[in-house]
Image (cartoon, rainbow, N blue to C red):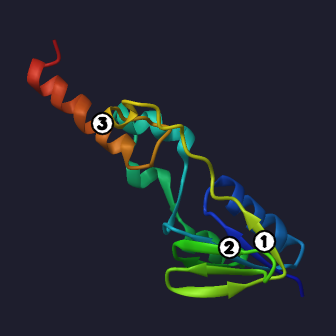
């Protein structure tokens, strides 16, 4: 059986894992967090319509439902010629590697001074807290 290692537990990584398992391929998914975050819903966290926890699906649940192995670890090095990935807590080998670690926004000068729902998942919580503080301070006026 072919062995595929997928780096990243976001939309692309999880979709690849599910698709490959349906083809009866041995899949291991490595993610640096234990949950799949539904980014398109971030706006509803900041406005208070939804809770952060409700927008997170445990990767363990997806792993069990679709039959892929899950490893929560931080990728340190990729050795493509050796077909090996070194993580903080272990080294993993594969026949095929899928890199689906997502993208990061460009860090323009001053960008450290604002939050974005397109940033890290936790930024939606920080935006909600700041909106709540503004409302409390001005009594919503």
Q: For mark 3, what is the residue?
A: 128
Q: Are marks 2 and 1 in contact (CB under 8 Å)?
A: yes
Label 2, residues with CA under 10 Å away: few <14, some 14-19, many ≥20: some
Q: For mark 1, what is the residue?
A: 97
Residue at 63 percent of width and 58 percent of height? 101
Q: Is residue 6 left or right of residue 55?
A: right
Q: In whole angstroms, how far apart are the C-alphas of marks 2 and 1?
A: 10 Å
Q: Is residue 108 above or below residue 27?
A: above
Q: Nearer the viewer, mark 2 or mark 3?
A: 2
Q: In whole angstroms, how far apart are the C-alphas of marks 2 and 3?
A: 37 Å
Can you tell which quarter of the image residue 65 is in? bottom right
In this rendered view, identify the residue nearer to me: 81 or 52: 81
Give SS at disc 1: strand
* Mark toward the start of the polypeptide (2 vs 1): 2
Where residue 132 sits: x, y (%)?
21, 31
Quadrant containing the C terminus is top left
Where residue 60 sits: x, y (%)?
55, 74
Q: For mark 2, what is the residue?
A: 78
Residue at 35 percent of width and 37 percent of height? 112
């Amino acid at each position: 059986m072919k062995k595929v290692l997928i780096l990243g537990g976001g939309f692309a990584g999880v979709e690849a894992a599910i698709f490959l398992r349906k083809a009866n391929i041995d899949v291991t998914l490595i993610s640096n967090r234990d949950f799949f975050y539904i980014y398109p819903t971030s706006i509803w966290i900041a406005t208070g319509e939804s809770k952060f926890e409700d927008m997170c699906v445990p990767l363990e649940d997806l792993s069990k439902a679709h039959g892929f192995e899950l490893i929560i670890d931080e990728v340190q090095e990729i050795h493509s010629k050796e077909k090996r990935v070194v993580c903080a807590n272990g080294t993993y080998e594969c026949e095929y590697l899928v890199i689906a670690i997502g993208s990061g926004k460009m860090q323009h000068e001053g960008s450290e001074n604002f939050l974005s729902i397109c940033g890290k998942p936790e930024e939606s919580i920080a935006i909600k807290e700041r909106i709540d503080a503004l409302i409390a301070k001005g009594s919503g006026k």
